[in-house]
Image (spheres, coloured by chain):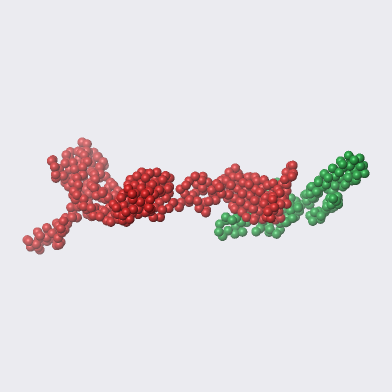
Chain colours: A green, B red
Amino acid sequence: MRRIIYQRADGKIWIACPALNIDDPPGWTEADSEQRAWDKLPADALNPRFIEASEVPIDRYFRDALKLDLTVDMVKAKEIHREKLRALRKPKLAVLDIEYMQADEAGDVATKAAIAVKKQALRDVTDDPAIAAATTPEALKAVVPAALLER
Amino acid sequence: MTTANYTRPNYSTQSGTVYPAGIDAMARVFERSASAFAPHEQTAGSPAPDLTVVVDAGPVLDISRAAPDLNEMAQQTVSGFTIPSAGQSRIDRVVINDTTGLAERVAGTAVTTGGSPSAAPPDIPARRLPVCQVAIASTDTAITNDMLTDERCGVPVKTSRARRGATVARSSDTILDAGDYDRTILATGTFTQTLTAAAVLGDGWYCFYRNDGVGSITLDPNARETIDGATTKALAAAQSCMIICDGSNFKTVGLGSATVAATQAEMEAGSDNTVMATPLNAKWAPSAAKAFARWNSAGTIAVNSSINMASISDGGVGIWDAQIATDFASATSYTGVAYGGVKSGVAPLVYNTFIAGAAGSFSVRASKGDTVIPSYADPDAPDEIHAVLFGDQA
């Protein structure tokens, strides 16, 4: 069954999937469901149009950067990717914070300096030049700085 | 009375012997029809006439019973006539009750003599056959033949066929008797309905009986007679049946309840026990889910199963809005629950929030459970969201 893509007043892109109900009357068709979904679109739905289900991206990594023409807004996508990187580094920073405190209690200056370098590398992951340089969603998603890959 | 061979009397052609004999024979042939319920002035008593009308004997063919019967009614005297006030006149009627065969007076309306309008006879009541009009003036002192206008229809009075099968409303006990043969009793209230002895009613007597109210009617045959093998039979509200008599006892046939389907309002109220829930109206019961949906929460959004939904809209990560096919009465007239499910059976890992937004739509939001300030997130698992709604539909 086709989908309906539209934008709402808040700028979000919505994709409606018509329902074929258990209790729909005999003879009810997918076309009837599509029409019903169309008729029941929110009052603030802008520029609605039918699209094929196969056109809807399955990978929802950049779902919130989707545009009405089904392409990805790369500015929004880069911010989404940075948020994902921040989420990935958060537990690593927490571990390093503990290790740093332990080294400090032991007076281990060398270890403290090494940890400081690692933490700075993690802080810098969102500034990775590859992020700014990425021109496609696929290239952007592939940018995972080395600091995040270390144990 | 005996009868005779009818030969039309003819004074011009018949002999002096044949002609009067023919008149005698003719009178014998005509007598039964001509004299039946014939009205005339009072001839008995002193003084005669008086303020009564005599109605001669006549037959009533009673077909209101299982076995039709010919009832010979004796001569009757109809009383109750009064002299109008000075300067007034009135026309009354005498009628025969086609059920009982009894003659009755129907009073007219007195009017000023010579005024306008002039006196008119009263209407003939339902289930009555006319006998005569009685014109009475204020100057009269007795009813004489010259005041009577014969209105008989020339046919024997009988209980008309229309009487059979008539409906009779009843809110308290009036014993079911021979006269109720083929009738439909529409009973209301709560009472015990007694029945005439089966031997009196006879084999083949029947009537139809419906509890047309909300109370309970108990059918109670005479003495130790039974109905459906028991001494009494209760008819609940809206139940109806045919009661048949075999001459010894009674049985019901087709005992059942009304098949009137409950309205949406009656289903929503959930308090009426006299109407029926049907496959169509069951969805309006308070206990029934008014809408349901199960859809993918990952990958391409797809509605996997639903009731009364128009669409599920994916508004971004962790955001879904649902449009309802038949709206609820208002945004506050329903409630629902949404939760995550996993096809593989793994326990849900996300918190889902149900928001009743409007009469025709609701929202579901999902977020990771470990965030202090919730931010919407697509769940890793479950891979399905379920929502069930209850409430009052428009």
The residue depicted at 64 percent of the width and 53 percent of the height is B294
Does residue B88 appear left or right of residue B335 in this picture? left
Q: Is residue A38 in view?
A: no
Residue found at the far left of this picture? B16
Quarter of the figure with residue B344:
bottom right
Does residue B84 appear left or right of residue B392 in this picture? left
Locate residue B299, reporting x and y percent: 71, 55
What number of labels is visible? 0
Pick the front one: B140 or A100:
A100
Residue found at the far right of this picture? A110
Locate residue B143, reporting x and y percent: 17, 43
Q: Is residue B77 in view?
A: yes
Locate residue B153, reporting x and y percent: 23, 53
The residue depicted at 74 percent of the width and 42 percent of the height is B373
Pick the front one: B264 or A7:
B264
Q: Quadrant of the N terminus of chain B?
A: bottom left
Locate residue B252, reporting x and y percent: 38, 53
Pick the front one: B144 or B29:
B29
The residue depicted at 28 percent of the width and 56 percent of the height is B67
The residue depicted at 15 percent of the width and 59 percent of the height is B3
Residue found at the far top of this picture? B86
